[in-house]
Image: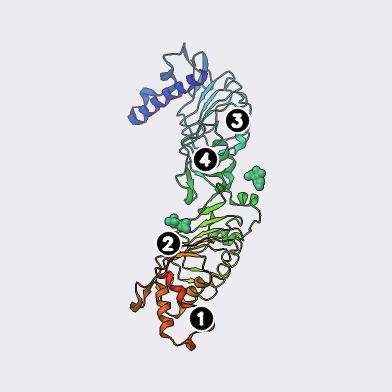
Amino acid sequence: MQMVKIILFLLLCTAVELRKIRNGRKENRNKHCGAKCMRKHSSHVKRFAHPLKNICEESLYYSEKVLTCQDKQLITIPSNLPDDIVHLQLAGNKINRLKDSMFSTLKNLKSLDLQRNDITTIQPGAFEGLDDLNTLLLQHNQLRFLSEEVFIPIPKLNYLRIYDNPWDCNCNLEDMVRKLQVPGHKNLGNLAKCKSPKVYVGQKLKKINPDWLCPNNIFSNISEVMDPPSSILKEVDFTRCHIYLFPKPQVDCQDKDLTKIPIGIPADVLEINLGSNKIKQLNGRDFIHFKKLDTLNLSNNHIETIDPAAFTGLLRLKTLDLSNNNLHSFKYGVLEDLYFIEKLVLTENPWKCDYQIHYLAYWLQVHYTVQFEGLECTMPNEFKGWTVQRYIKKYYEECPKENVINSYDYDISSLEEEEHGIRTRIIP
Ligand SMILES: *[C@@H]1O[C@H](CO)[C@@H](O)[C@H](O)[C@H]1NC(C)=O
Ligand SMILES: *[C@@H]1O[C@H](CO)[C@@H](O)[C@H](O)[C@H]1NC(C)=O
């Protein structure tokens, strides 16, 4: 009931404030929001004694003392505030810093309105002594950061407004974000959004995944931490990716304008999606740390070359999606480390049916359980639209045996079943 009253009271004030802003110059009429909005319930309104006389106005709201010091150019709170005030209104001033114990004499305070100031800093002990505070308004200020510690002295706080502050969503804000997201805290910080860094602009503090803010933290709970030099981290910023721990550890770096494999991805992830980026080549050892990876999605990039050692280390990889890239062929050796591969997606690549393609065809022939799709010649014109298998078959038919390098020599007849460039794995 108490809470409802306070919120009602604040709403009334806000309504008056809005009108005031709309009326612009006609401000005089509503100079003292507190006085106006409390007229109905106030038993009396009196001017406050010197030295607050012209600054603050005291009134009663449901027999609770209210002190209104609004729009007065104050740069700090007036000294000697009476210690029995329950609601303190300091909106629309020029306060820029809340210092430790600044309000500590106001033991009865239940609501504190500091909206529309220039607050950039709140010291951890600023709300010391406010045991009963349940409402804190800090919207329309200049806060980039707030320590979760400021909430320790105010355990009853259940209504917090902090929107329209330039929140810098970096690692320092992690604890604060976690606090806001506690399920019971449904009226804490609801509308606040990140102003920086660029990747999180516009994201709500209530919704952002706190794990993203401090990438190193999450890494520390996933064994085998990779510790990249910070210079490299900057170069390819892994924080652009999203990490999910459920249902399985996976990293989603889709559509992030990446030109290389980002460094710093936790080594224990099972799935990495790098789809829809601008990666042009895969370098040797790019995936060396991902010993548990089972799915790697590289679709929709510009990959032209794959180093023969690019997939080294991917001992458990089962699915590799290379669709929609710029691949003409695979260099000899590219697939040799993929012992457990089950599925290769190769569609929408400009496969070139010349001698270079033989390695891939040969490898698929030998690893006959591997399911693949999309292996179709786009050049030369002669073979355009053919499956690579058909091209290979023709090649062997036409070429005398002695022209064929031994390792590529295999039984041609078994190629026929792959005429369509698609092989569905047959489980024995
Ligand atoms: C870290 O992982 C262990 C088990 O692997 C788990 O019990 C613990 O809750 C995790 N800690 C955090 C902070 O996620
Ligand atoms: C790879 O990602 C693309 C785009 O998100 C998706 O369509 C495709 O199914 C994924 N491939 C695999 C094998 O999951």
Q: Position of residue 85 (x, y in %)?
A: 55, 19
Q: Which mark is residue 409?
A: 1
The residue carrying mark 3 is 127
Q: Secondary structure at mark 3?
A: loop
Foreground residue among 65 and 310: 310
Q: Residue at x 45, y 24 (%)?
A: 10
Q: Is residue 89 above or below residue 326?
A: above
Q: CA distance from mark 1 to mark 4?
A: 70 Å
Which tag, 3 or 2, sits closer to the chain's start? 3
Which residue type does callout 3 highlight?
A: Phe
Q: Position of residue 145 (x, y in %)?
A: 55, 42
- For disc 3, the neighbor class at 10 Å (few under 14, some 14 to 19, many from 20) is many
Which tag, 1 or 4, sits closer to the chain's start? 4
Q: CA distance from mark 2 to mark 4?
A: 40 Å
Q: Which mark is residue 143?
A: 4
Q: Position of residue 332 (x, y in %)?
A: 53, 76
The residue carrying mark 2 is 300
Q: Position of residue 201 (x, y in %)?
A: 46, 47
Q: Report whether 11 appears left or right of 102.
A: left
- Is the C-beta separation of discs 3 and 1 under 8 Å? no
